Amino acid sequence: MQFRAYLITFSLICALVLQIMPMPASVDLYRPEWVLLVLSYWTLALPHRVNIGVAFINGLVLDILLGSSLGVHSFAMCVSIYVLAANYQRLRNYSVWQQAIVIGVTSAFYNLIVFWLQHLLTDVYFLFTYMWPVVSSMVIWPWLFWLLRKLRRQMRLS
């Protein structure tokens, strides 16, 4: 009974850990946007529990963990989750593969907002390697979707 209430929190903490876990430099370029993926799933599955406020808090935590300017990931996360939350009824009816394409577009939008804000604040320049997480997020989405859906159904969250 206790774990049932904390499944969303536990999955978001796991996503934050996966987001900051050290990886070799050659593989780190392809790291999926774990927090965005988990927030996207919960926004599509339970929009009354996971919304822009949860995205804002997780974005701030991600800013602190990654050492970026405070509010960069938070703003990008809020905008991305808002787009998904505004269209969740339509997106739920798509197949998992169509959702993967939508998640890819959302991830690209998220990464471009983060780049744009960092460019305004620190004058970084765009490299195509910033977009590799979009591809890996699209590839990971079906498996993450099925895993989280199975956990949600086992815990009977509705």
Image: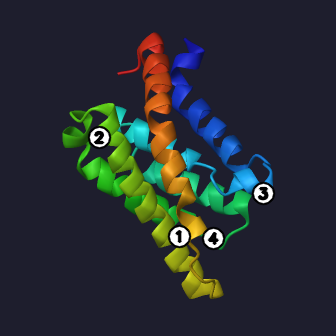
Residue drawn at (26%, 42%), measured in percent from left and top? Answer: 88
Between disc 2 and disc 1, whose residue precedes? Answer: 2
Where 18 falls versus 113 (above or below)? above
Of marks 3 and 1, the one in the foreground: 3
What residue is rendered at 48% in x and 41% in y? 139
Q: Secondary structure at mark 2?
A: helix
- Judged by depth in the image, the label closer to the viewer, 4 or 1, is 1
Pointer 3 residue: 25
Could you tell me the amino acid type at mark 3? Ala
Residue 114: assigned label: 1
Q: Which mark is residue 70?
A: 4
Q: CA distance from mark 4 to mark 2?
A: 33 Å
Q: Residues within 10 Å of mark 2 (few under 14, many from 20)?
A: some
Does the residue at mark 4 contact the one at mark 2 (Cβ under 8 Å)?
no
In the rendered structure, which disc, 4 or 2, sits on the residue that comes first in sequence? 4
Q: Amino acid at mark 4?
A: Leu
Asked whether 88 or 124 is in front, the reply is 124
Question: What label sits on residue 98 in the rendered view?
Answer: 2
Distance (Cα) linking label 2 and label 1: 24 Å
